[in-house]
Image (tube, grey):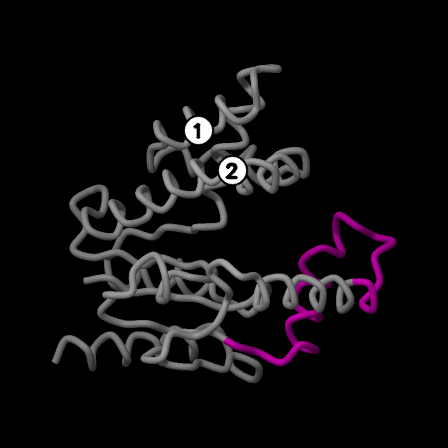
Amino acid sequence: MIVAIDGLAASGKGTLAKRLAEALGFAHLDSGLIYRAVAWKVLQDGGADLESAAIFAAIGLRAEDLTNPDLRTEIVAKAASKVAAIPEVRKAVLDFQRNFAKSPPGGAKGAVLDGRDIGTVVCPEADVKIFVTATPEERARRRFEELKPTHPHLTLDAVKADLADRDRRDTERPIAPAVPAPDAHLLDTTNLSIDSVVAKAKALVSGAVS
């Protein structure tokens, strides 16, 4: 079984996907880490031609590469935005995502993938598609609370502005925009606890199985 979870930044899709996969015994793929994993390999290559190194890294990507804690660093994030613009890298990443969904690692009986275009582009055949939403104010509050410990000078207004810009880029980009699939279930997490969100998602999966 394939479960596709999409949504905008700070909507709660990543936390939901991880918790749902654990509850179901499914493999989980955080699509946001894939380009970071490619970028990290390029950085380790040290000064090699960016495009060639990125393509080579993307083609050789393995699921265990996504567990590297160094992927969360700012330098890797910046490099990821560069490698993500390379068409051949995007194709290799798409192949990786689809292979993960069809053949989950560790012998898992299913896969939960989260991102922005899983249900529309990566796995349009997914058994369950969920598009996670929350109000812009709530998403900004969540991101602000997440970043505050490491960015003491950050303001809530700055986070709101950054999310608004990111939303515009994600939803208006010509290739694979972050929009719900026609058959996706909309799940508003604004006033829900994570336990309630997971329960609702589990009910959707159960409904698809029965």
Residue 188 to residue 4: above or below: below
Quarter of the figure that contains the N terminus = bottom left
Quarter of the figure that contains the C terminus = bottom left
- Residue 83 relative to residue 136: left or right: left
Q: Earlier in the sequence, mark 1 or mark 2?
A: 1
Residue 3 to residue 204: above or below: above
Helix, strand or loop under label 1: helix
Q: Position of residue 66 (x, y in %)?
A: 42, 38
- Which residue does the numbered mark 2 point to in the structure image? 86
Q: Position of residue 68 (x, y in %)?
A: 47, 33
- Residue 103 relative to residue 117: left or right: left
Residue shown at 36%/79% (left/top)?
A: 182
The verdict on residue 140 being magenta is: yes
Q: Position of residue 109 (x, y in %)?
A: 16, 55
Mark seen at residue 123: none
Give the residue type at disc 2: Ile
The verdict on residue 87 being magenta is: no
Q: Quadrant of residue 139?
A: bottom right
Q: Can you name the residue that lies furthest to the right here?
A: 153
Q: Nearer the viewer, residue 173 or 67?
A: 173
Label 1 – label 2 distance at C-alpha: 8 Å
- Which residue does the numbered mark 1 point to in the structure image? 55
Residue 171 to residue 97: above or below: below
- Residue 19 relative to residue 173: left or right: left
- Magenta residues span 133-158
Give the residue type at disc 1: Ile
Residue shown at 56%/84% (left/top)?
A: 191
Q: Are marks 1 and 2 in contact (CB under 8 Å)?
A: yes
Residue shown at 16%/45% (left/top)?
A: 107
Q: Quadrant of residue 190?
A: bottom right
